[in-house]
Image: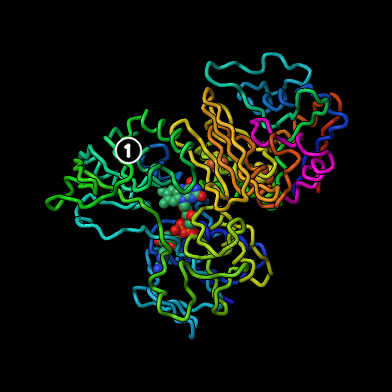
Amino acid sequence: MKYVIIGNSVAACGCIEAIRKVDAQNPIVVISDEKYRVYSRPLISYYLGGKVDESKMYIRDEDYYEKNKVETKLGKKAVAVDFKNKEVILDDGEKVKYDKLLIATGGKPFIPPTKGFELKNVFTFIKFDDVKAIDEAIKNGAKKAVVIGAGLSGLKAAEALIKRNLDVTVVELANRILGSILDLEASKIVQDELEKHGIVFKLETSVDEIIGDGKVEKVKLKNGEVLDADIVVFAIGVVPNIDFLKGTELKINRGIVVNNKMETNIEDVYAAGDCAEGYDFVFEQQRVIPIWPNAYNQGETAGYNMAGVEKTFDRGFPMNSIGFFDVHMITAGIVVPTSSDIEVLVKHDKEKNTYRKIYLKNGRVVGFMFINSIDRAGMITNMIKEGFNVESIKHRLLEEDFGYLDLPKEIRQEKILGGAKA
Amino acid sequence: MAKKIFPKEDVCVGCHLCEVYCVYAHSKYKKPNAKAHELVKLYIKHKDSKPTPRILVEEKSGTWTTFALQCRHCDDAPCTKACITGAMKRLEDGRIVCDEEKCVGCWSCIMACPHGAVRRGENKKAASKCDLCLELGEPACVKNCPNEALEIKEV
Ligand SMILES: Cc1cc2nc3c(=O)[nH]c(=O)nc-3n(C[C@H](O)[C@H](O)[C@H](O)COP(=O)(O)OP(=O)(O)OC[C@H]3O[C@@H](n4cnc5c(N)ncnc54)[C@H](O)[C@@H]3O)c2cc1C
Ligand code: SF4
Ligand code: SF4
């Protein structure tokens, strides 16, 4: 039995760790086109902003592969998979045989066709090498930055660039920032904070053309405005990184289609993480959920099943915990109501600058948005996961000190004492 | 299998002494041989930060129910799977600990912990949670609760 994993990020970790819980011996091979050992993608903005150094980028100890008996092929790209002969073909011509294969190739930046994208100092914001290159440009004197996209990674990029003393303008097509996780009111709270730190926003427009002679000099927006720029960072979003598998018998919709065991339509082939399209428990549909905990959980589930231990993961849904300067927010599930049968609970304390909003459906939490009031939010996330009926404690959910004391004694006791199982 | 601390709400008097001992047990100002009842000036107050106990006494005004909750050291610890830095991790003996040097305070663990057992530590810089008092042998809260409202058990 030989396990092969394409991709070396958190989904791969989940897979390795699950396999090794139940199979100590059989070989595992990890292939990645990046040369680094497993590092944290979310930490690239912290690296750029100077908060973590290279040694802290790695999410597992140095002896991780050795301890887990993993053979790595780093800096090598998988260019094709021969599903019939069960082998992965690498860019240097090497063929790697597998008995069980996990595809965990994650996401790649989404780039709309843009004139001038090929100019020097135009960057994406996904990989360690991306921020090393941006860092280099700053050291070479870049002073003005334009960030395209006011989503999670775009704003994290903007925050890091402001910390490096650049002038930063963020361009966003939607009418608000963080549109995927916040409503209009919440997004205003966060925008205020970011503006206070000097970030300038251009909403409801996008980039038309990047202008420069070899190197970026200006960015022309769709609204006609022209901004000076030494660097441009594209952070509009990610799409599954699966081009090399298109046109094969592997079933692909938006991402690689998997069931709740992370099996694809091809026997012995699994997929997990940002490249996979699994079941979203809150939205009740197949979706790509490109977030870290989901990637770990899917990778772990794949690992167990690859090693012959049947496990299912059918509780995936989007959740995010993110902060900018001193504003922290946690959101999960539905954040913009999708149907009229959703009940809304909301509390906006302007003085304390806190915001709590919760969506209920049939007496159960299906989503929430907490800003600056996040302690114990995991209890609510877990209620979504469990489908816990909150009808009797509804209004306590908006309180900052919501806790186990708000639950009936038997339930509380069961959760705490049986909490070992969580 | 990890050990876990079990709070007994029927005997907890809500005195918060567990919090005091917890802070002391993790204080860098600790005197090596001080006994529990000699708890005198064992913490030096900083200007900008209040010590965070790794235990959480739940109490609600108007009710007499109180108990002290701490990390359950879950078998399937969701905090470790959500942590973006690898700071939150399981040790070989089964305990879940946070490497506060590595933690960046993103609070993904707070988002994921079903018990709300992770706190934001001093200056809200790093996650602070029960480590079962690694170096003391026995958790300080369990040892010093005046009414034996906390118990450590292997499960
Ligand atoms: C800046 C930024 C900040 C983020 N912040 C957060 C956050 O705070 N919270 C959160 O939940 N999520 C966050 N995310 C999302 C999170 O990083 C991803 O969900 C997670 O990394 C997905 O993991 P993965 O294992 O699926 O794949 P990825 O992390 O995308 O890794 C895939 C790996 O496979 C490699 N690969 C791809 N194709 C091939 C090939 N053909 N051959 C060989 N190797 C290949 C890639 O180079 C890469 O190393 C952030 C993402 C970014 C970019
Ligand atoms: S912090 Fe929470 S999720 Fe993590 S082990 Fe403790 S109780 Fe479980
Ligand atoms: S706050 Fe620290 S321990 Fe918690 S998830 Fe973030 S980095 Fe990990």
The residue located at (24%, 57%) in the rendering is A114
Q: Residues within 10 Å of mark 1 (few under 14, many from 20)?
A: some
- Chain to which mark 1 belongs: A
Q: Quadrant of ligand 1?
A: bottom left
Q: Amino acid at mark 1?
A: Phe
Q: Is residue A38 visible?
A: no
Q: How is the image coloured?
A: rainbow
Which residue is farthest left? A213
Which residue matches tag 1?
Answer: A201
Magenta region, main secondary structure: helix
The residue located at (62%, 21%) in the rendering is B29
Residue B149 lies, in percent from the top left, at 84, 31
In-front residue for pair A103/A202: A202
Q: Which quadrant is the N terminus of chain A positioned in? A: bottom right
The residue located at (71%, 26%) in the rendering is B19
Q: Is residue A129 magenta?
A: no
Residue A231 location, quadrant: top left
Q: Is residue A88 above or below residue A213?
A: below
In-front residue for pair A123/B83: A123
Mark 1, ligand 1, within 8 Å: the answer is no
Q: Which residues are magenta?
A: A397-422
Q: Is residue A252 above or below residue A281?
A: below
The residue located at (67%, 32%) in the rendering is B54
Residue A151 lies, in percent from the top left, at 41, 46
Which residue is farthest top? B41
